[in-house]
């Protein structure tokens, strides 16, 4: 089971990175790039079912397609390939732990991808050791103004 988790973590990172590269380097639209990654993962599972366990057959297409949503991020927002791949890995970790919560709800993969991307985008902020960027300082000032106006 540990090997299957590692395979899904790697597949999530590669799916996110592949989608991002298709979108940025090969000028494919984000939806087309994500769809291509999802279709390739699904076709792989259909063509080679004997190579994979039952768990991977069920979850590999979901992880690849969901992680490809994190690769749809704009290069203006996130342009570091390592962080894009890391967002796919974070998505996979969220998928492992929260997939049972999303049963019956539409948009579960997209919600998990959004959360994973927000976690990845917060890493540079956390590395600054408490120093906030200008955008966060402006937001903090605006929040204080609104609190003062309510009083």
Image (cartoon, helix red, strand yellow):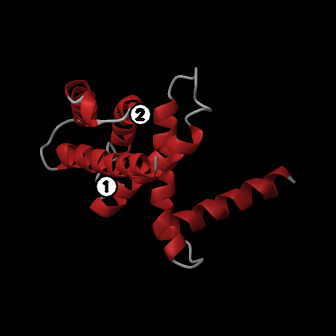
Sequence-wise, the earlier of marks 1 and 2 is 2
Q: In which quarter of the image is residue 47?
A: top left
Q: Kindly identify which residue carries mark 2.
A: 59
Q: Which residue lies furthest to the top in this view?
A: 104
Q: Which residue is drawn at 87% across and 54% down?
A: 151
Q: Residue furthest left?
A: 26
| Closer to the camera in the image, 104 or 107 | 104
| Closer to the camera in the image, 76 or 98 | 98
Q: Is residue 147 left or right of residue 54?
A: right
Q: Is residue 35 above or below residue 74?
A: above
Q: Is residue 11 left or right of residue 101?
A: left
In the rendering, at what x and y percent does residue 7 appear? Answer: 35, 48
Circle count: 2
Crowding around mark 2 (Cα neighbors within 10 Å: few <14, some 14 to 19, many 20+) is some
Query: Are the residues flagged by discs 1 and 2 in contact, CB closer than 8 Å?
Result: no
In the rendering, at what x and y percent does residue 44 appear? Answer: 22, 31
């Amino acid at each position: 089971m540990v090997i299957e988790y590692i395979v899904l973590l790697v597949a999530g990172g590669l799916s996110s990175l592949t989608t991002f590269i298709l979108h940025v380097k090969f000028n494919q639209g984000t939806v087309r790039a994500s769809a291509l990654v999802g279709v390739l993962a699904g076709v792989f599972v259909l063509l080679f079912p004997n190579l994979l366990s039952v768990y991977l057959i069920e979850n590999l297409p979901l992880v690849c397609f969901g992680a490809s949503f994190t690769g749809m991020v704009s290069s203006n927002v996130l342009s570091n390939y390592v962080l894009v791949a890391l967002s796919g890995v974070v998505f996979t970790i969220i998928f492992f732990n929260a997939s049972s919560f999303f049963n019956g709800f539409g948009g579960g993969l997209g919600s998990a991808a959004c959360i994973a991307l927000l976690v990845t985008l917060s890493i540079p902020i956390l590395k600054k050791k408490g120093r906030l960027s200008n955008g966060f300082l402006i937001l903090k000032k605006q929040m204080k103004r609104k609190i003062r106006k309510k009083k």
